[in-house]
Amino acid sequence: MAAVDVVPLVDEGLGNSAYLVDLGDGRALVVDVSLDLRAAWNAAQRRGLALGFAADTHLHADFLSGARQLAATEGTRVLAAAEGHREFAHTGLRDGDDVDLGGLRLQALATPGHTHEHLSFLLLDDDKPIGVFTGGSLLVGAAARTDLVSPEQTEALARQQYASLQRLASLPDEVPVWPTHGAGSFCSAPPGTQRTSTIGQEKATNPLLRASDEDSFVATLLDSLGSFPPYFLRLSEINRRGPAVFDAEPGLPALDVATVRALLDDGAQIIDTRPVPEFAAGHVPGAVSIPLRPAFVSWLGWLASHERPLVVVRGADQDPAEIAWQAAKIGYTNLAGELDGAVGAWTAAGLSTSSTRVVWPEHVGQGQVLDVRQTSEFAAGHLPGARHVELGSLADRAGEVPREPTVIMCGHGERAMGAASLLERAGHRDLAVMVGGPDDWARTTGRGLETGT
């Protein structure tokens, strides 16, 4: 058969890649596709393909799978691990099982570690390997984290991950590696731009494949584990039961000021997706700043409740469908709608707003500096004497931050504004957000950064 067309469908926000494979007969296979199916639909439509098969390598913790939606609306055949015990119609696969894709074959390889039931899928043309979908097993330069099931099972799963990587490394060197998790994923992919690889390249460069033995592998993997959003602990079970099937695309109904005020009185939360300068100039008191950008979805799942109604305030040039889809793919079906007219409608109703001061690096003096980046980022270089609290834990730790003039910073400013909004909600005042990151401060002031925690 001719060369197989494998199309990566990259989700920059989650740091993940799904894949669409043209099967050559008018049908396509999609692998690890999320509930936000727009990219898969568009790729299939451009090629005139029907989505015949949807394979999931594991019970995803960082997004809702789109496989059940495809089965319900397009008759797509779902392929997944039998040991996942999914509660909706699917073809349950075990180690060594083959699925005839109509010329190509998909072979299941048990590769536990990231999850207990994890499968990799070897794509074959007759007996020739075309490539392997490694999901959350072998990644480019890494392996996915093993601490999402439970703390008690983290090390045991890391040892299974070692065996799984060794198994994948036994494939021919020229076999392409198509992982799901990539740079930007909280499932432990290192920074970088490369999202696919080969078995040979990983054997030569992946530090985990070059570990001297199992114990060294486990120590290295466990040492790399950082924090992750709390929604990771909920989504795998929703994926096992089967995400609810949408009968229409998600959206943001328009809500007038009176309705929004009533929702707020009942415990709703305002999520302001506008850029940092617009939020800084004026926002609804108590709003949480989560600017709409690729990382929006992860921070929504980290900072916003999935149980309380959420009211969105967005910029006029921001796509409401994008906000709704991003929320839906991590199970946030609690978007009540958007404030019709945004902040202008709020002020027109005679209601007050809050503002947050923004400062440039050269204006950051000797006062308190709060750095809200991830621990690994902070350790790599931070302002001398800076206090560190990760943004994801700040709501619970706001009481640890002294109530004194504070400059908040991150890498660019978006996370810092999110932190400022959380501290404002907790009653902190005299806050400022620094535009830029520590490198900008060092370059501007000529001073050096500190390292370590």
Image (cartoon, rainbow, N blue to C red):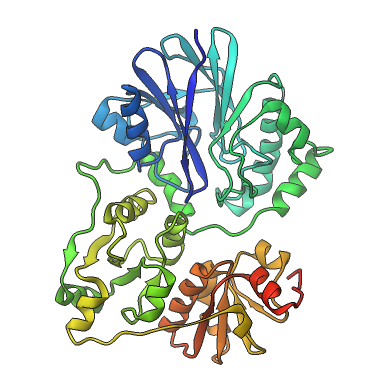
Numbered disc total? 0
Q: Residue 4: x, y in percent?
A: 50, 17
Question: Residue at 38% across / 22% down in the picture?
Answer: 28
Left-right relation of 141 to 413 = right
Question: Residue at 63% across / 89% down in the picture?
Answer: 367
Question: Residue at 24% across / 65% down in the picture?
Answer: 338
Q: Is residue 307 above or below residue 68?
A: below
Q: Quadrant of the C terminus?
A: bottom right
Q: Is residue 448 above or below residue 135?
A: below
Q: Residue 125: x, y in percent?
A: 53, 11
Give whichever of 204, 391 is nearer the camera. 204
Asked if residue 37 can be seen in this view, the reply is no
Q: Is residue 45 above or below residue 425?
A: above
Q: Is residue 428 above or below residue 97?
A: below
Q: Residue 49: x, y in percent?
A: 33, 22
Left-right relation of 445 to 315 = right
Asked if residue 123 can be seen in this view, the reply is yes
Give whichever of 376, 149 is nearer the camera. 376
Q: Residue furthest right?
A: 212
Left-right relation of 104 to 352 = right
Q: Residue 446: x, y in percent?
A: 74, 77
